[in-house]
Image: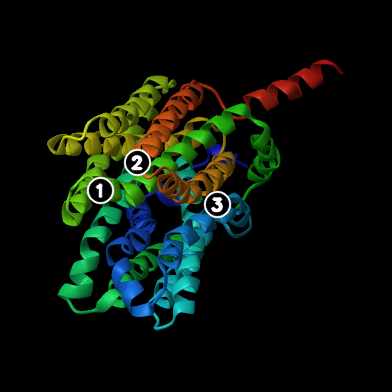
Amino acid sequence: MIPAQDAVNSRAQTRTGLSLLIIGIILIAGNLRAPLTAVGPIVGEIRGETGISNTWAGMMTTLPLLAFALLSPLSPRIARRMGMEHTLFAGLIVLLAGILMRSLPSIATLFAGTALIGIAIALSNVLVPALIKRDFPNNVGTMTGIYSVSMNLCAAVASGVSIPISQGLGLGWRGALGSWALLAIVSLAVWLPLLRSRQRPQAAQTYAAAKSDSLWRSPLAWQITLFMGLQSLFFYVNISWLPAIFQERGMSAVSAGWMISIMQFASLPANFFIPILAGRRSDQRGLAVAVASLFIAGYLGLLLTDVPWLVPLWVILVGIGSGSSFGLSIMFFALRTKSVQQSAELSGMAQSFGYLLAAVGPTLFGFIHDATGGWTVPLILLLVAGSGLLFVGLKAGKYGYVTAAADKEVEAAKGNR
């Protein structure tokens, strides 16, 4: 029997099957952020019609992040039982159910549907990087770039079309949120034939899974986890509070919203090219330094200068840093592991902690703003976090594998016998 980490799914050996798989990955990526970023522009409409408070409105962002944190470590175990394709397909079904439920005329279904969406996205967040490592072992960087760009492009589009759908087409906020069910349905249609070529879990995968418990004791795994967590913190703090910072400095709400759009679109080239660059070298410490430097320069500019025409420059630097750090963190799941199953386990571990940190970040920074009455201390903390990203990036970017320490311990134990 061929070990799972050395096997390429037979489906991917045919041109038609390979093309279908690539389309399937792009469609899943499109589903991973759009249902979440579509909420922000119409949150005022939702509050006005439902009567919920700002705190409960914030839960529409926090609930999915908590679901990411709680379910991410379980996703590889579910995939071991069901198979990766079947788990991704099931995730799309749950996503569709959540989108439809969220659009029903009930506050209870609004939050229940939001929770389901978070559960569904958590599965794919963890498994798609492992799927890419399995079926595209020679093109991990390119496929990771395509995956990252697809995810973030749809996220940016979702932010932009919510108001036109809700107000321009007269469908209301429920129609704007429910419209993303169409993408989920198309994705299900594409993934259905892919189920027939499911690669069943093998003994090698089970063995890798047994060894994966050591990830929680691996310093390298924790360095990658912290890198993932800090870049997630930056992203969700940015989309939550940068508009407020700009508006307090005299920028209009429309202009502040455009700054966030500029930030997201600036991230797209980096989303694509950084994984490719990372995949072509064994050591990614130089890329980690560049990524952290972009964040530090952008936040330092926002802290020290209040010149309106410079704001787009700082936002673009932060946007490029955001896209670069996300692409690099996803690549670490493939580059620092020896097997597909281990890649999924590392992805689950890193995303569990990462999204937990992301869920805490916006609330913490809002609290600090309220306590200090300004944005100076929160921006200083972002600079400190940028320095932390630099430190763990230098560790995570060094060539090696997450099991290296554990393997050495095993070998040492054997030598002592």
Name the spot of residue 181 as percent of width and height, x first. Answer: 35, 71
Residue at 49 percent across and 61 percent down: it is 63
Q: Is residue 373 above or below residue 331?
A: below
Q: Amino acid at mark 2?
A: Trp
For label 3, the SS is helix
Q: Is residue 364 left or right of residue 83?
A: left
Q: Amino acid at mark 3?
A: Ala
Q: Is residue 118 above or below residue 297?
A: below
Q: Which residue is mark 2?
A: 375
- Please state which of the two labelled residues, at mark 3 or mark 2, is closer to the viewer: 2
The image shows a total of numbered marks equal to 3
Residue at 53 percent across and 37 percent down: it is 225
Tell me if label 1 and label 2 are in contact, CB under 8 Å.
yes
Please tell me which of labels 3 and 1 falls first in the chain.
3
Name the spot of residue 293 as percent of width and height, x first. Answer: 33, 25
| In the image, farthest residue toward the bottom | 105
Name the spot of residue 59 as percent of width and height, x first. Answer: 46, 63
Q: Which residue is mark 1?
A: 248
Q: Amino acid at mark 1?
A: Glu
Q: Is residue 417 above or below residue 88?
A: above
For label 2, the SS is loop
Q: Which residue is mark 3?
A: 69
Please tell me which of labels 1 and 2 falls first in the chain.
1
| In the image, farthest residue toward the top | 415
Quarter that holds the N terminus: top right
Residue at 74 percent across and 22 percent down: it is 409
- Please state which of the two labelled residues, at mark 3 or mark 1, is closer to the viewer: 1
Name the spot of residue 128 as percent of width and height, x first. Answer: 45, 49
For label 1, the SS is helix
Quarter that holds the C terminus: top right
